[in-house]
Image (cartoon, rainbow, N blue to C red):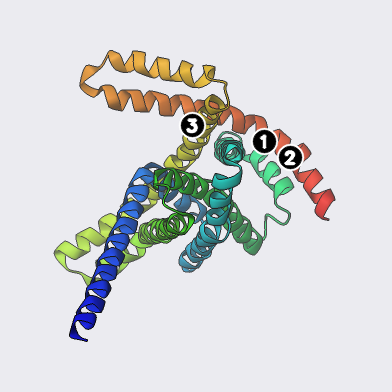
Amino acid sequence: MSTGLLALLDDVAAIARMAAASVDDIAGAAAKAGAKSAGVVIDDAAVTPRYVVGFAAERELPIIARIARGSIRNKLVFLLPVALVLSLVAPWLITPLLMLGAAFLCYEGAEKVYEKLAPHAAHAHEEKIIPGAGDPRAVEDARVASAIKTDFILSAEIMAIALATIPAEGVATQALVLAIVAVGITAAVYGAVALIVKADDLGVALAARGGAVLGAIGRLLVKGMPVFLNGLAVVGTLAMLWVGGGILLHGSATLGWHAPEELIHGISVTLAGNIPAAEAVVEWLVFAAGSGLVGLAVGAALIPVASHVIVPVWRRAFA
């Protein structure tokens, strides 16, 4: 009887070791997948704060919370099951769908550039796209909806990169790793965004304490955060253009049209070769700039299409 009990305990210990190893494997896969998608995660964190700029301070955290809820819904409810199903039954569809989303990113980025270059024309375009754009609640709802749509594209890219990183060890393992990546990245991105947009309020609180060190830090935050947020809004716009353009270039090459990506890659390699001390950095910057120009061109072409074709057709279909 004691022998049977020892055998049972050995079996339990073996199962426990296997479970622990499985947990370690899943955690390791999640960490690797998250690291691989770090570039898109940074773009996501840079893009999001611009959707909060211009609102009253008391609306900033509620808006971030609304976007974060939409982001986690995007990843867990829509993208995770779709990614798993497509990878099993129609992997060829993933690239065209990512390119469609990339075109939307390009449109969003080009719209922001248009707004800076021609604010009156951009406002007229916004009135066509968003009924009641002068109403603060309508503007907030539209801004949140736009942020969630942009997040959807960036999240799709994150989930696609993560899925490609996970070893093919079963759908359940892939789903669990993707869920961990989705929750972890969403918490990291929107936690960072909340800290960024509320840093000026923290600065006011520190300055009010009156201490020499804390007061100086507080005043620096109060003066510096508006400049930082405006700069981050510019980076976010650029990120949408270079990420969107990059997806379109890579997607075109995947579908068989290699010329655009090879042209920009060739230019980046040639220019980087002239600066050996910073070859990798220069190559990345030149390729990102080329991708951004592609994104800007595609986005600019889509602005009149959105105003005169897509929105009218959409409203007639769902009026």
Marks 1 and 2: in contact by CB < 8 Å? yes
CA gap between label 1 and label 3 equals 19 Å
Judge from the rendering whether residue 79 lies leftward or rightward of residue 184; answer left or right: right
* Side (left or right) of 153 relative to 43: right
Asked where in the image residue 12 lies, by quadrant, the reply is bottom left
Query: Which residue: 47% across, 16% down?
Result: 263
Q: State the residue position of label 2.
A: 307
Q: Answer with mark 1 or mark 3, whichever residue precedes in sequence.
A: 3
Q: Relative to 21, is 315 on the left or the right?
A: right
Q: Nearer the viewer, mark 2 or mark 3?
A: 3
> How many C-alpha atoms fall within 10 Å of the one at disc 1: few (<14), some, or many (≥20)?
many
- The answer to which of marks 2 and 3 sits earlier in the sequence is 3
Residue shown at 28% from the left, 25% from the top = 280
Residue marked by disc 1: 303
Labelled pair 1, 3 in contact (Cβ < 8 Å): no
Q: Which residue type carries mark 3?
A: Gly
